Image (cartoon, rainbow, N blue to C red):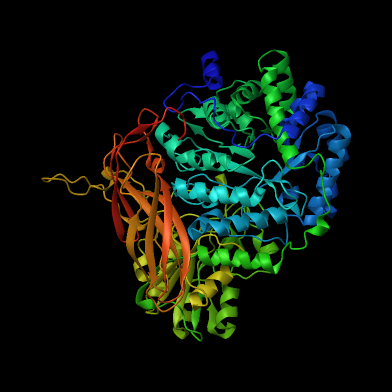
Amino acid sequence: MNNIKNIAMASLVCLGSLAVDAQVAPAIPSDPEIEANIQRWLKKMTLEEKIGQMCEITVDVVTDFPGSKNGFKLSEAMLDTVIGKYKVGSILNVPLSVAQKKEVWASTIRQIQEKSMKEIGIPCIYGVDQIHGTTYTLDGTLFPQGVNMGATFNRALVRRGAEISAYETKAGCIPWTYAPVVDLGRDPRWPRMWENYGEDCYLNAEMGVEAVKGFQGEDPNHIGEYNVAACMKHYMGYGVPVSGKDRTPSSISRTDMREKHFAPFLAAVKAGALSVMVNSGVDNGMPFHANKELLTAWLKEDLNWDGMIVTDWADINNLCTRDHIAETKKEAVKIAINAGIDMSMVPYEVSFCDYLKELVEEGEVPMSRIDDAVARVLRLKYRLGLFDNPYWDIKKYVKFGSEEFASEALRAAEESEVLLKNEGNILPLKKGTKILLAGPNANSMRCLNGGWSYSWQGHRADEFAGAYNTIYEALCNEFGKDNIVYEPGVTYAPYKNDNWWEENTPEIEKSVKAAAGVDVIIACIGENSYCETPGNMSDLTLSVNQRNLVKELAATGKPVILVLNQGRPRIINDIEPLADAVVNVMLPGNYGGDALANLLSGDANFSGKMPFTYPRFINSLATYDYKPCENMGQMGGNYNYDAVMDVQWTFGYGLSYTTFQYSNLKVNKTEFIDSDELVFSVDVTNTGSVAGKESVLLYSKDLVASSTPDNIRLRNFDKIELAPGETKTVTLKLKGSDLAFVGYDGKWRLEKGNFIIRCGDQRIDISCTKTKIWDTPNR
């Protein structure tokens, strides 16, 4: 047991851990006034006060539940215990587990802050998971989920969405949001795949940076009155559990961890992210909450980052109760704090404070570690301006829930929905078309929003999102109610104990009968809402009921349009050939139905592209950046490798109502070294008859390397809008070092040799003339 404890507490020396250059510039410039204030507090605070600042408790603990029958009410007695006695510095989560009006939020947080300032003189910091707009503030603006925002390939939309979310979050006096999510969604079995920006590390990094800047503004030391602190999550490698199940172990190579999974966090920290939440899982036997190498060396020391690390839900206790690297909860606290955790999301008990005090007094946790953690907590609070304004007048937030914000959410939804198939140009549908609308997702706000929407599992969305349009309501508005026949055929069972997958006895015959009087059938299929571990499943194949519905509707001979409304790709290889058109709307939020109606009618044009690889077969999961040996097929002689990439739709794929032609791909230099800037330009022409937006994606392929190179890698992108016949020249820049990779020895390296650069159907060859190997952990 002692050996296990020592390993967990130690900074592991392995392939990714290299000497840190003492001259690494601070990720966030230090503010002398803030630092002086922190030091004054550290000198006068008691040990109990310091430890309290490192503790985060859920609001349930301080809620008067008997009083909540007539609305939410805090318990003064529990506030006396939690804040008065234990000096707890942070509270999180949602009162009564459901979204509240901004006035309730403001009143609640004011009461907490008045107590904290009276008892401690230090403001509390309140945190909430507002991951796709104001998901826990009623009447605010919900944006599409992260996977949809990735599909837009539009940086400006992501930043604007975060700005609006920050504004509306701040309207409830909430200063801290647990977003953005930049886990890589590289395994479609994983139930949280829809929370991030897709499978690619560069896309997640770019969108993560935009979200951080949108949430926080341009000055991380002085968060403005309309901004909040971002919290990057979940650090890191959360999206590739070996089993595909949530919070189960991963087995990530050091090269992939450094080169891919770390990349979004590295970029966001350099962009000023103020806090990071840790991955709940275990990698190669080591829980992330116990990994000093990743928490302290990679994140804090290597990047010279002075931000704060918070745990995920109960994950210090899990080191004992689940992961068994500690015999007791007290020992778990020791391991995690010494590894680099600054704040513990306990979340139901204050025993953390007692355990940590004992550990300090016993010399098991050094006072220097306590002071460092508390300094990081106080620094976050100073940067948010909470000492001067622990709460504020919410009347100034006059744009809350405004038409201006709604139009941005609608635009994001329109740019995120992906047209995957359009045989015979069946779309757009002409006005006056008689439509049969079927499927369990056709008339549900819950399905459009997914989890983290008004409630954790999203199951109360229909109750609170009645002002918005389901797909059925939106199509009635767009095509006329008389032209829409709604007969679902398959429906989801009422909510009970997270039974999101359960369906009622199908009534497919009713849909089939209704098809006789229509011109076209739209089948809205996919998933009900779920979140985290309750979303675990063992078979990605779409339900039998839904597939039978599509098969029997197709047998009527009427054209079928499939609308896929789901948080992850569900296997549909047997029904996709039956469809004339396929639209993947994923989880587009409250305005997703309106967006779909606009797109189906041609009032808007499709421009979304797939942010992940859609699998064709249940046992053949892949990502676009696969290794060459994964796509070999027939080798010489009679030996069949039987390793062929056969996917339903590829990363970056997406159709439009117009066509685009690429030409004239150029680069400023065809030979380069690591320090060079490569400037690529390509002409893109709208060769169709309607205006359209095009995501211009730049890929690289390393032909030969000392470690097997990826098949292809996304290196840059831009999104443009073109009128019919219009041509624009798109410029995309790279540094030579952007083409480096992490070698088997754990070092970044750019090797002499040849690369292919692709953009659309264009190709250009470039060559690195000099090998560069970095001695620093990051380029």
Q: Is residue 620 visible?
A: no
Coordinates of residue 445 in the picture (x, y in percent): 61, 64
Taking the spot 37% from the left edge, 57% from the top edge, the residue there is 650
Q: Nearer the viewer, residue 411 or 76?
A: 411
For this view, does 457 lie left or right of residue 106? left
Residue positioned 72% across, 28% down in the render? 374
Residue 738 on image: x %, y %: 41, 43
Split into 4 quadrants, where in the image is the C terminus? top left
Q: Would you identify the image quadrant in which residue 413 lies?
A: bottom right
The total of numbered circles placed on residues is 0
**Where residue 654 sits: x, y (%)?**
41, 64
Query: Seen in the image, is 363 located left or right of residue 319?
Result: right
How far across and down, in percent of the image, does residue 232 sit? Answer: 59, 42
Q: Farthest front residue?
A: 668
Q: Residue at x 74, y 52 (%)?
A: 170
Q: Quadrant of residue 459?
A: bottom right
- Asked if 324 appears above or below 118 in the picture, the reply is above
Q: Considering only vertical position in the picture, is 418 above or below 647?
A: below
Q: Is 574 left or right of 408, judged from the image as shown?
A: left
Q: Give me the residue at 70% from left, 62% from top.
A: 464
Which of the 4 image quarters holds residue 473? bottom right
Image quarter in which the N terminus is found:
top right
Say if residue 421 shows up in the picture: yes
Front-lying residue, 439 or 468: 468
